[in-house]
Amino acid sequence: ALHVLEVNLARISEAREDADNTFTFVRNQIADCLEELERYDDCLDLRRKNYEACPPGFTKFHLNLAINYCRSLKRHDNAAAKEFMRDEDLVARIKSEFGDDHPTTHGCLQIYAFTLIGEPWQRSPDDDMAEAAAIITDIARRWQRRLGAKHPQAKLMQAASKKMQVQINKEAVAVAVEKCADDTKGQTCYICTEALHWKTNEGLVRMCSCRGTAGFAHVSCLAEQAKIFGK
């Protein structure tokens, strides 16, 4: 398939001088093939050329090329992809051109959200994580409304939304535990009476005005207790 596309591209290039849009379209197909072949560097280079060479007057096509470029760039350099999307104001431009509920808009938003989340081995800024969670939650809500709660894609996005919220909660707990580390040293949770939570292995916090040895707890224990009292 890649060879056929390359031959077709050569013919278009030789036959027509005004075939810029067709030329770019075929090169975009070649980039798709390169991605499938896991030739990611070649794919990224071609997607960049496509985005930069797209002729004026093809706004939607140009924006789609930008999305494809961002997707490839994220694989190579997540921070660069996030910076590109912000510098180009890509999300706002996509929404303006396609509308809030268009699949192209949702695809762009998902890529942007993943750049905000960043790499698994790096802790993303809290503001970025919160923005990513808001994006995923909004898409999940829109898909559920449009496709129905039982649709596989709606379920998938809803699961991603819940996973994001769990991750944000875990990071918030870790920050709180770290801030309380000096105060909670040698203490135990007043609910479960353990220093470390039996399931999450989280440490203690004390976010109240208690004095002495009172008021130390695990956030997970407080959450579970709130559920019980709320019934």
Image (cartoon, rainbow, N blue to C red):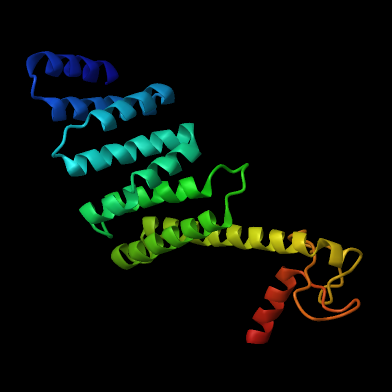
Please provide percent x and percent y for residue 45: 36, 24
Q: Residue furthest front?
A: 87
Say left or right for 81 vs 192. Answer: left
Residue 20 placement: quadrant: top left
Q: Residue at x 38, y 21 (%)?
A: 42
Task: Quarter of the image for the C terminus: give it.
Answer: bottom right
Q: Residue at x 44, y 63 (%)?
A: 137
Please provide percent x and percent y for residue 217: 79, 72
Q: Say which of 193 and 69 sits in front.
A: 69
Residue 199 placement: quadrant: bottom right
Residue 20 to residue 106: above or below: above
Please provide percent x and percent y for residue 185: 88, 63
Q: Say which of 169 and 128 sits in front.
A: 128
Say left or right for 2 vs 226. Answer: left
Please provide percent x and percent y for residue 230: 63, 85
Q: Residue at x 9, y 19 (%)?
A: 17
Whether residue 231 is visible? no
Whether residue 207 is visible? yes
